[in-house]
Amino acid sequence: MTETKGGGSPSQDSLTTSDPAMLRALAHPLRIEILSIIDEVGEATASEIATRTGQTVANCSFHLRSLEKAGYVERAEPHGREKPWRSAHRKRVIEPDPDDATAVRQSGLISAGIVQHEAGRLTEFLTDPRALPPEWVRAVTVTTAGLWATADEMEQLTHDVLALLERFAGRRENPSLRPEGAVRGRMLLTVNPDRDAIWSGRA
């Protein structure tokens, strides 16, 4: 399962899909980056995205239209001559059919692209020479852990952690819900079994 949070004021609350066509549409590094930018800023024009990505406006427009056709983004309200895009959903959950090897592989490519994008962002943050205020130094966490669990337990662990995020729901759209001093934060979560252990049958 791959779950990401949308931005802006989308027309739909949640998207859960195993559609191979939708998976193929997102299995592209630039499209993952474009969607991440829109999620971060809420709304963005092709020109703004081109500036952020270093791509041409034409190339960004092409990929935005592809994302729109697949149902991931939609047009936001125009601002004069500007025609911004926004996420079509507040939350996206990709759940490939476990019996469809192609869909599982495409989902893996999407997840890997998201991890690479977030890893780059996190590396920039951690190596930024500017000093953080002490209270924010203590708030930064990078954690790795090993665990022994069944497939059902790993799946439940993911759901349990995601449920904890519900306490922050609505703060993007409604600033009045944010306590004083709140800033935008990021979380990268992955729970996965050891493939070698599965393939070798080791307990």
Image (spheres, rainbow, N blue to C red):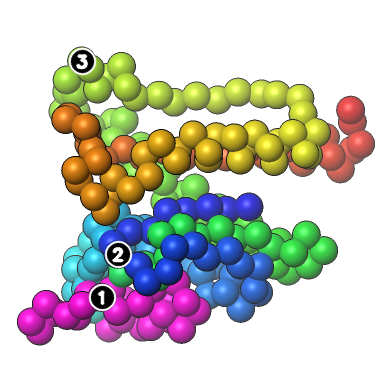
* Residue nearer the viewer, 65 or 196: 65
Q: Amino acid at mark 3?
A: Pro
With 136 as the anchor, is 156 left or right in this view? right
Identity of the residue drawn at 59% across and 35% down: 160
- First reached walking from the N terminus: tag 2 or tag 1: 2
- In three-dimensional space, the C-alpha distance between marks 2 and 3, rounded to whole angstroms, equals 34 Å
Report the residue at 50% width, 56% height from top.
113
Q: Are marks 3 and 1 in contact (CB under 8 Å)?
A: no
| Type of the residue with mark 2 | Ser
Q: Residues within 10 Å of mark 1 (few under 14, many from 20)?
A: many
Q: Are marks 2 and 1 in contact (CB under 8 Å)?
A: yes
The residue positioned farthest toward the left in the image shown: 80
Q: Which residues are magenta?
A: 58-85
Q: Which residue is mark 2?
A: 9
Whether residue 62 is visible? yes
In this orientation, which residue lies closer to the viewer: 149 or 76? 76
> Which corner quadrant of the image does residue 48 belong to?
bottom left
Please say whether residue 82 is one of the residues in the magenta stretch.
Answer: yes
Q: Is residue 111 in view from this perspective?
A: no
Residue 194: % across, % down? 74, 36
Residue 76 - label: 1
